[in-house]
Amino acid sequence: MKLILHVWRQSGPSDEGRFDRYELESVSPDSSFLEMLDELNEKLLHEGKEPVAFEHDCREGICGSCGMVINGVAHGPQRTTTCQLHMRTFKDGDEIWIEPWRAEAFPVLKDLVVDRSGFDRIIQAGGFISVNTGNPQDANAVPVPKRAAELAFDAAECIGCGACVAACPNASAMLFTAAKISHLNLLPQGQPERRERTKKMLTQQDVEGFGHCSNHEECEAVCPKGISVRYIAMANTDLRKGYLGGQAVMTDD
């Protein structure tokens, strides 16, 4: 496959960026998108030019580090992570535009790499259980309603890639934050700190500069793990109960 690439290049956070045009002549349709970028970087290094900086780690769709906007869509035209996007999705002669996540809370560090440490600080604000739970218990010793267990497991699948932020018109992190809140709030072990956890994590989200939920549901549309916007509703319900003193109960209503 012959491809024309328009790649965002930016030397540093305070530098102006630009799209640079590159051509690749023989891309295998069986290669992944990241393998295609590897091929581009080998070509650039052979020509004595600076390779394109991009994030990656597991390349198995698990770590969430490989995020980039491809032809205007977070992670590209398929609902998957960038590392699991294969070049057979494109056609010979296609032009592909590649750029980093666009959000004030995700400042560009270099080329396609952005600073997503704001996600870490949201987790640090309350995404944990700190109360004394006593000695370790058998796995089935604490009964968990089946529905709550299923919802908690689904929420815990969030890999923190940031596609939800990149897709949202307001650059909201609400889907990420709500998933991280809900997977603990749904379980018995998460009940003692449920209200404070919710308030602290949503407050930290605002501190980081993420926007408010736009209700467009673009976040769910691009989430590679299929996290539902229902968790946003659940987090908002928990927030309201926390401020109004409502009874905290395990529910997905």
Image (cartoon, grey):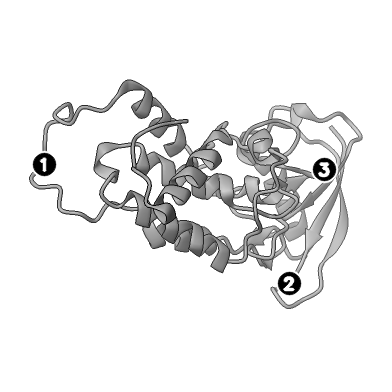
Q: Does the rendering let one see residue 160? A: no
Q: Residue at x 34, y 42 (%)?
A: 248
Q: Position of residue 168 (x, y in %)?
A: 71, 48
Upstream in sequence: badge 2 or badge 3: 2
Kindly identify the residue that appears in the image at 73 percent across and 38 percent down. 76
Q: Is residue 160 left or right of residue 181?
A: right
Amino acid type of the residue that numbered disc 1 sits on in the rendered structure: Pro
Q: Assign a secondary structure to mark 3.
A: loop
Crowding around mark 2 (Cα neighbors within 10 Å: few <14, some 14 to 19, many 20+) is: some
Position of the N terminus, as image quadrant, is top right
Q: Is residue 86 left or right of residue 129?
A: right
Q: Which residue is mark 2?
A: 11
Q: Locate residue 16, reporting x and y percent.
A: 81, 73
Q: Which mark is residue 71?
A: 3
| Residue under pointer 1 | 136
Question: Toward the viewer: 222 or 244?
Answer: 244
Determine the residue located farthest toward the left in the rendered image: 135
Q: Which of disc 1 and disc 2 is earlier in sequence?
A: 2
Q: Nearer the viewer, residue 94 or 81?
A: 81
Circles 2 and 3, Cβ within 8 Å, touching? The answer is no
Give the residue at the far bottom of this rendering.
14
Residue 28 higher or lower than 20, as above or below: above
Give the crowd class for mark 1: few <14, some 14-19, many >=20 residues within 10 Å.
few
Where, by quadrant of the figure, is residue 208 drawn? bottom right
The one nearer the camera, 72 or 94, is 72
Sooner in the amino-acid sequence: mark 3 or mark 1: 3
The x and y percentages for residue 113 are: 65, 60
Please, what is the three-letter code of the amino acid marked with disc 2?
Ser
Residue 155, picture quadrant: top left
State the CA–CA distance, disc 2 to disc 1: 50 Å
